[in-house]
Amino acid sequence: MRKLISLRYLDFTTKQSSFPDNGVGCLTSLRNLSIFECSYLTCLPRDTSYLASLRTLMIGNCKQLDLVMENYQGIPLRFQKLGIRKVPRMATLPEWFQGATNTLQVLVIRDCENLESLPGWLTSFTSLRRLVLTSCPKLLSLPDEMHRLTALTEVRIRNCPDLERRYQRDTGEDWPKISHVPNVYFLD
């Protein structure tokens, strides 16, 4: 992969449990990375330098993947879009996502059956415009300070029973937390 340093888009699928050494980390021009159908993958690449240039990260159907990064050095991230689907080991968003505090515009989380909470630091994502939560049955609530997300223009919630009940327009006990968002959808 070292010869592909100007590669900008990569769709990655593997049956391996880890990324190859000196692999994705050397792709410093990478803008879009999709990691899909990696049933045995347990961790993201150890070399995190590629993260600084990414605009879009999509992760899906990675049953063994643990998104926690022990060696993450606080690299400022430029993610504009982050999508996570079918990552059952994720109970909350990993700390390293905080590196995208000023740039993340779209966050989509789908089919994460063990997602229990969204961290309070999510409310410091000043550029977040769109939040989509689908089929996360253990997710009970959104962070308390959701009103701080002043750029947020759309929230979509589907198949998250507790969220649907608590954030129902005008009647839900936590509706005031997201009442400032112009477009709130509960989809069947």
Image (cartoon, rainbow, N blue to C red):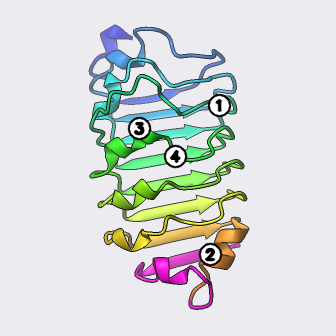
Quadrant in the rendering for residue 166: bottom right
**Disc on the earlier residue, 3 or 1:** 1
Name which residue type carries label 4: Leu
Closest to the camera, between mark 2 and mark 4, is 4
Q: Position of residue 112 (x, y in %)?
A: 66, 48
Q: CA distance from mark 3 to mark 1?
A: 23 Å
Residue denoted by label 4: 93
Q: Which residue is mark 1?
A: 37
Task: Tell me the amino acid under the disc marked 2.
Answer: Phe
Q: Position of 45 compared to 115: left or right?
A: left
The region drawn magenta spans 170-188
Q: Secondary structure at mark 4?
A: loop
Of labels 2 and 4, earlier in sequence is 4
Mark 3 crowd level (few <14, some 14–19, many ≥20, 10 Å Cα): some
Q: Is residue 174 magenta?
A: yes
**Closer to viewer: mark 4 or mark 1:** 4
4 and 1 marks in contact (CB < 8 Å): no
For the N terminus, the quadrant is top left
x and y percent of residue 150 in the render? 32, 72
User: Mark 3 falls on what kind of element?
Assistant: helix
Q: Earlier in the sequence, mark 2 or mark 3?
A: 3
Residue appearing at x 68%, y 29% in the figure? 64
Query: Which residue position is annotated with label 3?
Result: 96
> With respect to residue 136, does 90 lie above or below?
above
Q: Quadrant of the C terminus?
A: bottom right
- Local secondary structure at mark 1: loop
Q: Which mark is residue 168?
A: none
> What is the crowding at mark 2: few (fewer than 14 residues within 10 Å), some, or many (at least 20)?
some
Residue 72 lies in what quarter of the image?
A: top left
Give the Cα distance between marks 1 and 2: 28 Å
> Cβ–Cβ below 8 Å for labels 4 and 3?
no
